[in-house]
Image: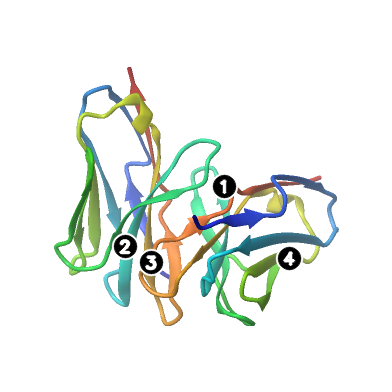
């Protein structure tokens, strides 16, 4: 069983603050690390797919880094906006048949 | 656009009933997954499938079975529903490999 851990469990920030979350995953048998954004009453949607050690990805104000040797990834949000409020999930893909296991998520609330 | 469709948005069943949750995807994806989501626990993998008729247990398979007779359809079966199976169930699909997953809209199941 792959154990994917995320921290913190929840975060409340003010509009304009920058913030970051952590995802840790087993580095053995690693295939890919995904970040998803899950808004209330919607389905999770992929933000990033990361595969190589040292990968850095960016989409607007959101970016992510990957360290496969030590088994962690960071997600950064610069200048948080109320519309960034959501649960952010990371998932590790691996195993012989390409399973996908998630962490418990970080619930971000951005106050205006 | 990839579409993953779950047969019901809300479902209420009685204890002991056999329950079928259906998931259909239209993008010829090899991988399909069933998760349940409970507060504070994130998405927990119940079963996944990597090809037609091929399945693998996830982290919490007890009380569930699955069926994948056609590539586009992956069914989750609750053999004898119990109240502790009251939860949100999410289906997802992806290409085999590192690719991101696409999610259905979720089925909120209540067992009374």
Secondary-structure class at tag 3: loop
Which residue does the numbered mark 1 point to in the structure image? B38
The CA distance from mark 3 to mark 4 is 26 Å
State the image coordinates of residue B103 (x, y, percent, origin top left): 53, 54
Mark drawn on residue B99: 3
Along the line of sight, which residue is nearer the eye, A37 or B65?
A37
Residue at 17 percent across and 67 percent down: it is A53
State the image coordinates of residue A96 (x, y, percent, origin top left): 42, 82
Which residue does the numbered mark 2 point to in the structure image? A33
Residues at badges 1 and 3 in contact (C-beta under 8 Å)?
no
Q: Earlier in the sequence, mark 1 or mark 4?
A: 1
Along the line of sight, which residue is nearer the eye, B79 or A37?
A37
Residues at badges 3 and 4 in contact (C-beta under 8 Å)?
no
Which residue does the numbered mark 4 point to in the structure image? B77
Residue at 65 percent across and 68 percent down: it is B74
Work out whether disc 1 and disc 2 sit on a shared chain. no
- Furthest toward the front, the residue is B1
State the image coordinates of residue B91 (x, y, percent, origin top left): 58, 58
The CA distance from mark 1 to mark 2 is 22 Å
Label 2 vs label 3, nearer the camera: 3
Work out whether disc 1 and disc 3 sit on a shared chain. yes
Task: Using the image, name the chain to which the residue with label 4 belongs.
Answer: B
Secondary-structure class at tag 4: strand
């Amino acid at each position: 069983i792959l154990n994917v851990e995320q921290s913190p469990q929840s975060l409340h920030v003010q509009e304009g603050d920058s913030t970051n979350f952590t995802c840790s995953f087993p580095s053995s048998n690693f295939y890919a690390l995904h970040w998803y954004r899950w808004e209330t009453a919607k389905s999770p949607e992929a933000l990033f797919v990361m595969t190589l050690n040292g990968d850095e990805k960016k989409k607007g104000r959101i970016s992510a880094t990957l360290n496969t040797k030590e088994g962690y990834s960071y997600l950064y949000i610069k200048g948080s906006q109320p519309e960034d409020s959501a649960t952010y999930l990371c998932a590790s893909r691996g195993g012989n048949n390409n399973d996908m296991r998630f962490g418990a998520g970080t619930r971000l609330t951005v106050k205006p | 656009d990839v579409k993953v469709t779950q047969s019901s948005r809300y479902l209420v069943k009685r204890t002991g009933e056999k329950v079928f949750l259906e998931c259909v995807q239209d993008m010829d994806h090899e991988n399909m997954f069933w998760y349940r989501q409970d507060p504070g626990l994130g998405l927990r993998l119940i079963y996944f499938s990597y090809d037609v008729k091929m399945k693998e247990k996830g982290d919490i398979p007890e009380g569930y079975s699955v069926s994948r007779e056609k590539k586009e359809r992956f069914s989750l079966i609750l053999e004898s529903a119990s109240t502790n199976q009251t939860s949100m169930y999410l289906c997802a699909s992806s290409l085999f490999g590192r690719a991101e997953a696409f999610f259905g809209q979720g089925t909120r199941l209540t067992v009374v």
